[in-house]
Image (cartoon, rainbow, N blue to C red):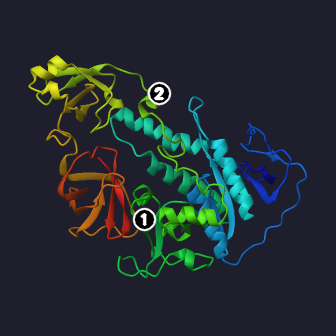
């Protein structure tokens, strides 16, 4: 384990972030990080034998990179510096419940070490309030309504491209960059025909033409455009996704080439920032359990559950089915076929289960969906034109058309879709371009 690099911390004027200059020389002095200042929310640190560090502004623009402590954002910072940008690494501190084992301290240290290796300043930005309100509170409220929330979409909107974006721009950054697998491409006009290459290759300061568009990543298995549809279109000309044109194995190879400590670090999984958590256990901290009935497709009671709000469509765990009741219903109890949640009634606190996950009773097993809270990254889709869409992450793209009915935005799929529950995002594509999307009503 290498020794922590030498760092000096200087608070930003807005008291919400602290600037730490890290140096690549290894010292045996101890890195001491104090608790967050209760009044201003400033993380401070001290290192013995520190020396002054002078910024060397580049001519290709100033960029703040969101460093999570993972390999993707680390390589993003390395590529931008290699291209000649003036790079600052920013670690975003978010709200963390005290009863969940989190790795944020280790992640922050890895981000610091990456900055030290690259010779760039490190900043810790406190966005606990934004994350708690716009991601966690939103998620709990949606589950209480019986909806299926998408916290990762909201995290990108309000934290990474909300609080972080605004902080970076107000601090003088020309761009913000993250390790997302997506691309921002330049178009001559708001259309899907004219492409001129990604903006990282232009190496130029200032704003770009309003033809910036969000494209899918080159690595289809890692593409994250589904979670980015709520970015504002005016932000695109100031956003960089350096690894969006690479495949994951190449990113890890580059990390080793740059000598980054995150080269072999496992990818994070689960909820944005919080990682892999048991969602039911998490929700039960905020929502009381309430025993309810499990019904079959004929409306007969065959079991119980601890709350319809804790269950999602297509789920096969979290409820109990009485074997005798199931057998009386004609179900083949000997084969112990699994049951899936195909419908739920939050007001009555009941759920309907079936051995067929694509049962006709499945909510959302239909061709037409109404969406609300739409956000378009360019012009709104043309009525009647064929597009592609997905209801969930990594779902194969489906053919759709748009129609307006009584001032409501309706999406017509060419084939029936299962699992499209209220609260989920439907994201629209024109070829490899992400046009935006909306929330299922």
* 325, above or below 205, in the image: above
Q: Residue furthest top?
A: 324
The answer to which quarter of the image holds residue 84 is bottom right
Q: Earlier in the sequence, mark 2 or mark 1?
A: 1
Q: Residue furthest right?
A: 49
Location of mark 1 (residue):
219
Q: Secondary structure at mark 2?
A: loop
- Residue 286: mark: 2
Q: How far apart in space, not on screen, are marks 2 and 1 (Cα)?
A: 38 Å
Q: Is residue 148 visible?
A: yes
Residue at image location 47% in from the left, 43% down from the top = 270
Q: Is residue 123 visible?
A: no
Q: Position of residue 419 (x, y in %)?
A: 26, 45
Horizontal side, residue 158 vs residue 90: left or right = left
Residue at image location 50% in from the left, 60% down from the top = 180
Q: Position of residue 376 (x, y in %)?
A: 38, 63
């Amino acid at each position: 384990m290498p020794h922590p690099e030498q760092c000096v911390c200087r608070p930003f004027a807005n008291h919400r972030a602290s600037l730490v200059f890290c140096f690549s020389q290894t010292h045996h002095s101890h890195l001491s990080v104090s608790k967050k200042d209760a009044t201003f929310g400033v993380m401070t640190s001290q290192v013995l034998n520190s020396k002054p560090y002078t910024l060397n502004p580049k001519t290709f623009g100033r960029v703040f990179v969101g460093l999570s402590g993972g390999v993707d954002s680390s390589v993003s910072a390395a590529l931008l510096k290699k291209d000649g940008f003036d790079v600052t690494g920013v670690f975003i501190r978010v709200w963390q419940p005290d009863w969940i084992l989190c790795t944020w301290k280790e992640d922050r240290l890895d981000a610091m070490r990456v900055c030290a290796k690259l010779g760039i300043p490190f900043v810790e930005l406190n966005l606990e309030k934004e994350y708690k309100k716009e991601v966690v509170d939103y998620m709990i409220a949606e589950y209480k309504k019986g909806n299926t929330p998408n916290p990762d979409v909201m995290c990108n909107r309000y934290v990474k491209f909300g609080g972080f974006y605004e902080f970076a721009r107000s601090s003088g950054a020309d761009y913000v960059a993250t390790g997302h697998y997506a691309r921002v491409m330049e178009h001559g006009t708001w259309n899907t025909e004219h492409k001129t290459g990604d903006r990282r290759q232009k190496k130029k300061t200032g704003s770009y033409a309003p033809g910036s568009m969000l494209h899918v990543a080159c690595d289809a298995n890692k593409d994250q455009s589904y979670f980015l549809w709520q970015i504002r279109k005016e932000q695109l000309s100031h956003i960089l996704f350096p690894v969006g044109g690479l495949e994951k194995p190449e990113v890890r190879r580059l990390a080793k080439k740059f000598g980054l400590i995150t080269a072999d670090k496992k990818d994070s999984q689960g909820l944005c920032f919080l990682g892999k958590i048991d969602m039911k256990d998490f929700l039960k901290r905020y929502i009381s359990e309430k025993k309810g009935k499990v019904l079959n497709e004929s409306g007969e009671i065959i079991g119980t559950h601890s709350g319809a709000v804790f269950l999602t469509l297509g789920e096969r765990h979290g409820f109990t089915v009485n074997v005798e009741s199931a057998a009386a219903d004609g179900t083949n109890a000997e084969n112990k076929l699994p049951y899936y949640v195909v419908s739920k009634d939050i007001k009555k606190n009941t759920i309907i289960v079936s051995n067929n996950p694509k049962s006709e009773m499945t909510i959302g097993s239909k061709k037409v969906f109404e969406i609300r809270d739409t956000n378009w990254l360019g012009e709104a889709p043309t009525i009647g034109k064929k597009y592609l869409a997905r209801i969930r992450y990594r779902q194969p793209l489906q053919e759709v058309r748009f129609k307006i009915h009584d001032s409501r935005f309706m999406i017509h799929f060419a084939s029936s879709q299962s699992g499209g529950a209220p609260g989920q995002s439907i994201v629209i594509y024109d070829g490899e371009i992400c046009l935006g999307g909306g929330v299922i009503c």
